[in-house]
Structure formats: structure tokens, C-alpha cells
Amino acid sequence: MTAPPIAADAAATTIPFFPPDLFDGDREALLDAVRAIGTGTAQKFILGEHTAALERALRSRLTAATAGAAGDVVACSSGTSALSLLLAAMDIGPGDEVVVPAFGCAPLAATVLDAGARPVFADIDPLRLTIDPAAAEALIGPRTRALLPAHMFSVMADMPAFRDLADRYGLRLIEDSALAQGGTLRGRPAGCWGDAGVYSFVQVKTFGMPGEGGVAITRDAELGEAVRMLRNHGQDGAHRFVHHRVGHNSRFDEVMALFQLHRLPGLDGRLARRAEISAYYSRRFAPLADRGLVAPPVGGDGRFHYVYTVLTDRRDELRDHLAARGIASHVYYPRPLPAQPAFAPHAAAGPGAGWPNAASAARRNLSLPLYPHLTDAQAEHIADAVHAFADTYICTDTNRER
Ligand SMILES: *Cc1c(COP(=O)(O)O)cnc(C)c1O
């Protein structure tokens, strides 16, 4: 079967993967924030009252969602930095090992190495694409100090299993929930399953902003206090120039805090629109499983809607097919972490060890456009194009084996 002809205007319409107009509706608010901070009498540009207000606002959202003890939310300069601050606050360093996924973003390995510890790479679950708890358990040894699972694309890691592992082996549990803000599993928000979690506010994330920033989240008050100190050169809030610990510079910008406070009331609406588009894709793609296209696991629990990622052996062909129809798509993490030049020397794979599921995901993943202002017509055009591609699938014996 050949793909139906595409109307010339549809093909010419480019649907970007990273839309440049994410903040078009908030330009005035951004300029107002710059003006307010820039002309304010306090001339306080970092870690001021607006950063504190943003931390309180995020904390009360999480407290409401967990109906639990008030935790701490500490704003810092990025999601990556939040991970580094947590590792430092937990005194994880030379001689220690942290079990991380073999598939994911560089900070999972880089922050551990920066701390002086060693990342130990565990393979992932082939469908969830998140770290496999059994693989992680097999790597726990006498030097293991922490587990660092990460949520991927739109699926939360199996946090109940990791909570159980951490408790059984007496390990720290750091949840890389950088991209999962808005997700919940068994009623508990992403970021609230570990001893600590993180969110990133880099532009494309679900609560992204036009700049760098993030938060560390923890219900452990002592840990929160340590992160607060570490983000500002190890000083406590009351005494400048008293450095209790060797700290970092990982502070939050007041302009961005004001802007995020402006954007926060709209977050749930934007998350709901992402969920709606994602559910539409899932309905359209369900019949394509036997035509070589694997959609994310269905079911709302433990799903969030950052990007929509499919798996196919013909990934590069699908990307070209979509591009020819004016649809941009994106390949995340085309190499597993242990195969990266920077991390390979630290990835001691014993005989027979390897990360076959990570390698497969790296070869087969493709993410489709998913953002709140994607129109219904655009989502339909994307789903139609994917269908047209799947219709060209020939079920050979080789394909059948996969
Ligand atoms: C985005 C991301 C990070 C890093 O966040 P930054 O704010 O870009 O430093 C870390 N982990 C995961 C899983 C991410 O998606």
C-alpha cells in the first residue's frame, strides 16, 4: 500500500518539534518582570522574595497533592545542578557508587562523576524505557550508596520497586523527575517518591521558562537545609561569609521567579492539553502495534506528557517520512550512556554484561511534536502521517521475529 498523496499546503506547513512560540502569550509578563526587578529599589536579582514565593507556591502544590508533611522545594540554577546539590548534600563522593540508567541524558552519569563517585549503569525496561529494578538490584554492591532512577519521555520509572530496593538495602533514592513535573503514580507526584527529586525549568520542559533553572524537592528537612546552603557557596541564610560546607554557585534568578509565578496558574491547563493530545495519539496508534510501531504503554497511572515517543525498527525512515510531510520529530539519546566517549571509561562492563534494551531504545526511539498549542488539526495530520507510514510496513519473517 502506498501513502495517500499529501496536499501541497499540508506538506509545506512545518510543524516544529521545538516550537519557537512557547512564550508568545507571555511576552508582556516577561518584560514586566524584567522591568519590576530591574527598577526595584532592592536591586535584588537572585534568591530574593520572588524566588522564595515560587518555592512556597510549588511546595503547597505538592503538599496538597500528597496530603502530606510539608516538604522543602529549593530553587537552583538547573535540573542538573539540583542533582549535583543533592549528591553533595548526601555526602556521596569518592569510593561511592550510584546506580543509574544506561539510557537517558548526560547529567545522570556526569553529576555522579562530578561528585567523584562512580555511575554504575543498569539496563532499562524495553517498553517503559526506564531503569529496570531487577537490573539495578543485580548491580548493588558494598560501595553502592544511592539509586538514581529517571523518568523518561512520558513514563515514570517503577518508583514503588525502587523505594522498596532503597529501603531493603539502606540506600539513598534520588528521583530524576526533571522532565516529569505533573506526573503522578499511585496518587503520589513525580519528584515525591525518592528521598529527593528534581524538576528542570529549561525551556522545553513542562514548566519550562525562557532561561535556566530548576528545583530540588525533598521531605527530609535536613537534606533541604543542606541543599539551601550548598546552592549559595555553603553559607546559611543568616550569616554571609560563613561557609559551613564547600558549596556551589547554583542560585535562582528573580526575573525568572516572577515569570514562573505568572505562568504557574496556567500549568494545569497546559498539562491537561498535553494529556489530551497524548491520549489522541495513543488511540490512533493502538492498531499499529502489529505494523512495527510501538506506542508508549497505555494507562494514566505513572504517565505524564512531556514528549510522545514511539519505537520502530525503521526509525530513520519514519523521521524522513514525517519530514517530507512538514512534521519535525526528534531522536533523543541516540547512544546509550555507557557508549558515550565521556562515560565509557567508567562503564566497567564485565564479561557478558551489556545494555541490550538501552541499545535498542537508542536505535528505535522517535518523539513526535507534543505541546499545549499544537492544534487538533496538526495532531491529526501527524497521526495520519504515522498511519500512512505504518501502512507501508511489510511483515517479513525478520520483522515478525522482533
Ligand atoms: C532536562 C533533564 C535534566 C537536566 O535539567 P537541566 O535543567 O537541563 O539541567 C536532567 N535529567 C533529565 C531526565 C532531564 O530531562
Image (spheres, rainbow, N blue to C red):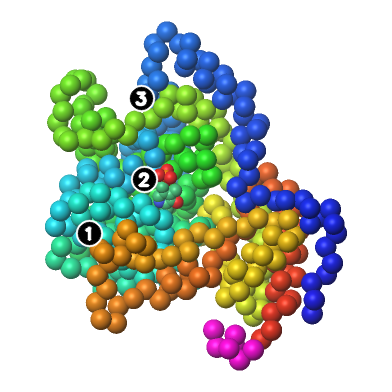
Which residue is at the front of the view, 5 or 305? 5
User: Mark 2, mark 3: which one is toward the viewer?
Assistant: 2
Label 1 belongs to which residue? Answer: 118
Relative to 322, residue 40 above or below: above
Q: Residue at x 61, y 91 (%)?
A: 397
Residue drawn at (24%, 24%) of the image: 237
Main secondary structure type of the part rendered in magenta? helix
Q: Quadrant of residue 86?
A: top left
Q: Quadrant of the N terminus?
A: bottom right
- Between 348 and 35, the one lying in front of the other is 348
- Above or below residue 183? Residue 52 is above
Name the residue tied to disc 3: 47
Q: Quadrant of residue 345?
A: bottom left
Left or right: residue 54 versus residue 6 is left
Under tag 1, what secondary structure?
Answer: strand
Magenta residues, start to end: 396-402
Query: Is any part of residue 162 visible from this angle?
Result: no
The amino acid beneath tag 2 is Thr
Disc 2 is placed on an element classified as helix
Residue, disc 2: 80
At mark 3, the secondary structure is loop
